Amino acid sequence: MAKTSLLLCFIFVVFASVSVSLAKKELGIYELKKGNFCVKLTNWGATVVSIVLPDKKGKLADVVLGYDSIEEYKSDTSYFGSIVGRVANRIGGAQFSINGTHYKLVANEGKNMLHGGLRGFSDVVWKVKKHKEEGHSPYITFTYRSFDGEQGFPGDLTVEVTYMLFGENKMSVTMKAKALNKATPVNLAQHTYWNLGGHNSGDILSQTVQIFGSHITPVDKELIPTGQINYIKGTPYDFLEPHTVGSKIYQLPSGYDINYVLDGGRGHRMKKTAMVHDSKSGRVMELWTNAPGVQFYTSNGLKDVKGKGGYVYQPHAALCLETQGFPDSVNHPNFPSQIVYPGKSYKHFMLFRFTTK
């Protein structure tokens, strides 16, 4: 009996060791490379870890904020580079109703839900479905299956995200989801923090931005949309003509954190979303999407965040352009619906083009 117990203990220890080993192997860093354009990602949160681009003189720099290790991403609270969901941005009161059925979600920002709750899609391990590191169009596809009741959301949901490099310094992000058995809201967003001067180059206040959206969805003091859609011409939110981030930011309480209603209609066709230019490096980023909105965020909440190479990120160290459905659309019938019904699919595309001038 003692020998049997000893053997069972030994088997348990070996099994536990193998399980831990396999668990560790689940997480990894994956590279996409096309010439001197290099993107690194991790399957923790389907996250963009780094994007290395040349400046106007050919000097390479990493233009996204982040960390040196996966462990740091696992304790991150800023959503650096991750895919956020099942519903990005905020849901007021962490609740909504579909066809008369009321759902209470997991609140993680006061009484509200932000970016999918306490453990959204940014805080789970995604499977690597396919990975082609180099070649004409290197790409990687991550998949995740969200279960019925996860963070309070109804229904099982399959999710797939593909990052691809193609052409000359172009990157596409394709986000797809399919509701399997219940109607559910789906609003995924890619939450990279951009600094075209380099992640460790200081703030982005001198960088020039243009946003092709003439309206915003204003918010209350908790950053929950009021349901209104306001014209922004002549206000501090007006980026219809390109100007620096810092030129009007101090007219706002802490910086930009608002959803723009993109011009070009509410259809699902691709439309030009924004342009960013860093005059010092000469780097330019152009963004297109089929989503109806884009959240412009100037990293107001960053403070003493230790990032790559020990560099410490402060407020306005980067900007985010998160294409999306409108925040809290589940509670505003006048906003474009983000409800996906069983058997139907959600499709969200982003296209980035990087140049210099």
Image (cartoon, grey):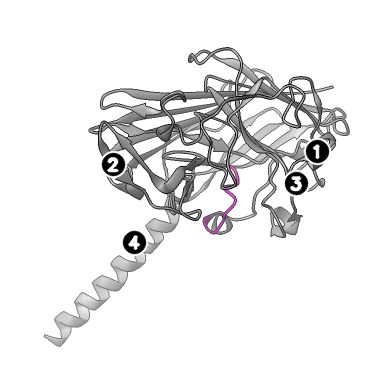
Q: Secondary structure at mark 4?
A: helix
The image shows residue 186 at horizontal and vertical percentages of 40, 33
Q: Nearer the viewer, residue 85 or 16?
A: 85
Q: Quadrant of the N terminus?
A: bottom left
Give the amino acid at mark 3. Answer: Ala
Q: In the rendered structure, are the residues bearing label 4 and label 3 in contact, judged by CB atoms less than 8 Å apart? A: no
Q: Which residue is mark 1?
A: 197
Residue 178 position by quadrant: top left
Write down the quadrant of residue 10 in the picture: bottom left
Crowd rating for badge 4 (residues with CA inside 10 Å; few <14, some 14–19, many 20+): few
Q: Residues within 10 Å of mark 3 (few under 14, many from 20)?
A: many
For the record, the magenta segment spans 74-81
Residue at 63%, 35% (x, y): give it.
258
Of pointers 1 and 4, the one earlier in the residue sequence: 4
Secondary structure of the residue carrying numbered label 1: loop
Q: Residue at x 41, y 39 (%)?
A: 86
Q: Secondary structure at mark 2?
A: strand
Residue denoted by label 3: 317
Task: Choose the circle earlier in sequence order: 3 or 2.
Answer: 2
Q: Which mark is residue 263?
A: none
